[in-house]
Amino acid sequence: MLDQQTNERRLTIARAMAEAMAQEMRRDPSVFVMGEDIGPFGGIFGNTRGLIDEFGKDRVRDTPISETGFISAAVGAAMDGMRPVVELMFVDFFGVCFDAIYNQMAKNTYFSGGNSSVPMVLMTSTGGGYSDAGQHSQCLYGTFAHLPGMKVVSPSNAYDAKGLMTAAIREDNPVVYMYHKGLQGMGWLGTEPGATVHTPEEDYVVEIGKAKVVREGSDVTLVGLAMGVHNALKAADKLAEDGVSAEVVDLVSLVPLDRETVRASVAKTGRLIVVDEDYHSYGVTGEIIATVCEHDIGKLKAAPARVAFPDVPIPYARNMEQFCLPNADKIVAAYRAMQKAEG
Amino acid sequence: MKPTKDQLLWMYENMVLSRRFEEAIEKVYMEGKTPAFNMANGPIPGEMHLSNGQEPCAVGVCVHLTDEDIVTATHRPHHQAIAKGVDLRGMTAEIFGKSTGLSGGRGGHMHIFDADVNFSCSGIIGESCGPACGAALSRKMQGKPGVAVAFLGEGAANQGAFHEALNLAGVWKLPVVFVIEDNSWGISVPKSEATAVERNDVRAAGYGMPGHHIPGNDPEAIFDIAGQAIERARAGEGPTLIEIETYRLAGHFMGDAEQYRPEGEKDALFEKDPIPKMRARLLADGTATEAELDKIETAAGEKVEDAIGYARDSAPARDEDALTAVFV
Amino acid sequence: MATDVTVPTDLWEGDLEAVITNWLASDGQAVKQGALLAEIMVEKSQFEVTAPADGTLTITQAADAIVRKGDTIGRIG
């Protein structure tokens, strides 16, 4: 017991990401990191802290504000034997460089008939809740997951963050690694304590494409990722007070999507609520609901529901943004509405 | 080009107004954020990018503009907005996220839009350039007068959008002026490590337009060069690129520890603060009296106080309004 | 003998207050000297607090607590 306690080490997601990168850089000289303010500054969101001290400016490269340039460069380097980890500071900035991402990074493997590979990681911050408005607060999960050719992951806690980063760096395909700012453990962005968890020091991988049941239940399945998982867990606590047993599924990965775990959970509970901080339409929520409905609609006791961001740009004013964001109360309300409809 | 007394005093007035405004915003921003600095808290949440130190760039350019001319600005827009004549009450209320804000609280400090004076901005680096070209093209196609000015930072000059827009402006001879405020830092990365040339004005040659470099953060030197560029644009002779050496007296955003700055840099910058410098110069050459300048400063303070009071007293944005104005 | 875990006095200039943003070790946990215990933040800058000794950690100031240089935030016994 004492040993186990001695071994307990909690990390923030920011630290877990940096630790995974450092370990992979030690292991594999082809791994290098580049992006804006990822050098001495340590990343705006703390996820590259300490790397430049150990690996130097050659392998931890601060870039100009030239996302098309350096993300395309990562594609070229990856196809030539390196394993770059590049950072797009805010996912909202994808607009200035998306060709590099979805036409080059995501398609070169296919267009080469599988003869070339693009083993790179594109890490990027997502999420709002701190009034940064609609050019610095989006999630855009659905946008990236929609386009074939890139794997997409988004951790909800430090353990997964480390294992997913390690897996992403070792992966021979491009991986978009989306980390939610509100889970980073940066106090100035608010801190979700549930994301800071025990994280082993030794390297390990969390399998890309495998969802996790993070809370077992029998009455309703709540599906989410990243911040959505924490909202779902809080909702599950509230529902439990009323004797409702909610199961919570953390998708962990969007591509590949672990449809089996979702279906198995809904087969058990018969009810489905999908939580997503990305926009309501054409996104993760619709995909998850379709995954269940097109498989076996007979398992559903009620029409599925989704709690997502309405189809509007993310507003600045705090009350407006909070009005739009998913939260535990909205999930509980969705369950109540479901119950009412069932009669 | 030499400024008249009125123009000098206008520039001084707007520099002071911008500075007083940001001092007030800085104070309110920190409400609810000490000792625990959580961006989401206080009357002004979110990121806050202050422009103090960079005021000369805005006033030296905008003094040549009318309401009809167009300005596209950046994520650090306050000084540019003030110099362009953006409604101060509306901008302040917007930054407070109030219903009376220019955008009803939807935009906040990085998204200031005031159609009455043809002012807009974007929080995305380099994205001021293309829209300025388009506005200039529109005036040309409509046969209407007007010049467009795109403000950007030196970091933005490494974005594709900047280079594409410059080429467009050059090949179509658009009435547009690109004004780079070179404060030497892209967040924590120094210009010297991010830009392949020492000065961005040399890049103008690649796009068939004149380029100018203005050292010293000097409002009168900016007045001169910007005046010539705007005149050239008005005369249909095409675009100009200007790079102004300026200083960011604050961090990239509020709360920035600025550990990347070499020791002593901040102190040296404050010694070069353009506002006391201009005041001294106006007094030394007899352009203005102490009383005149004091009056300007007092009036600026009152204007800011009024705007802050207006914003504080305004009703908050309505929750449901978050769902409106997506389309007209 | 118990050793106090205190906020280091040399991490930042001036007497600004800090906030404990994260405890990276748990109450009652055995820790080794030098292990990372907590993150504290002044404005947007984060700093580390490490274990001054081997032993069992008792947390006396929880996350989100406001602290000053030299304050005791825990004990190792």
Image: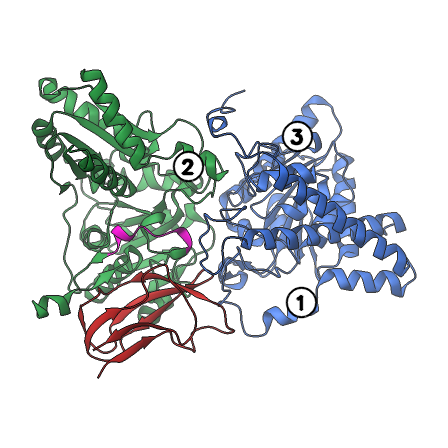
Chain colours: A green, B blue, C red
What residue would you read off at disc 1? B270
Alpha carbon of mark 2 to alpha carbon of mark 3: how far? 28 Å
Q: What residue type is labelled 3?
A: Ala
Label 1: state its secondary structure.
helix
| Residue matched to label 2 | A322
Percent coordinates x, y for residue B182 in the rendering: 61, 56
Q: In this view, does A179 lie above or below B272?
A: above
Residue A269 visible in the shown view:
yes
**Disc 2, disc 1: CB below 8 Å?**
no
At horizontal 71% and vertical 47% (from top left) the residue drawn is B304
Which residue matches tag 3? Answer: B115
The magenta span reads A188-196
Q: How crowded is mark 1: few (under 14 residues within 10 Å), some or many (20 or more)?
A: some
Q: In this view, does B208 lie to the left or right of A228?
A: right
Instruction: Check whether the beta carbons of the residues at disc 1 and disc 3 lie within 8 A of each other.
Output: no
Question: Amino acid type of disc 2?
Answer: Gln
Residue B121's quadrant in the figure? top right
- Identify the amino acid type marked 1: Phe
- In the visual, does B158 lie left or right of A61? right
- Chain to which mark 1 belongs: B
Q: Which of A65 and A190 is in front in this view?
A: A190
- Earlier sequence position, callout 1 versus callout 3: 3
Task: Residue at 45%, 47% (x, y): give it.
Answer: B40
* Picture quadrant where residue A27 is located: bottom left
| Mark 1–mark 3 distance (CA, rounded to whole Å) | 35 Å
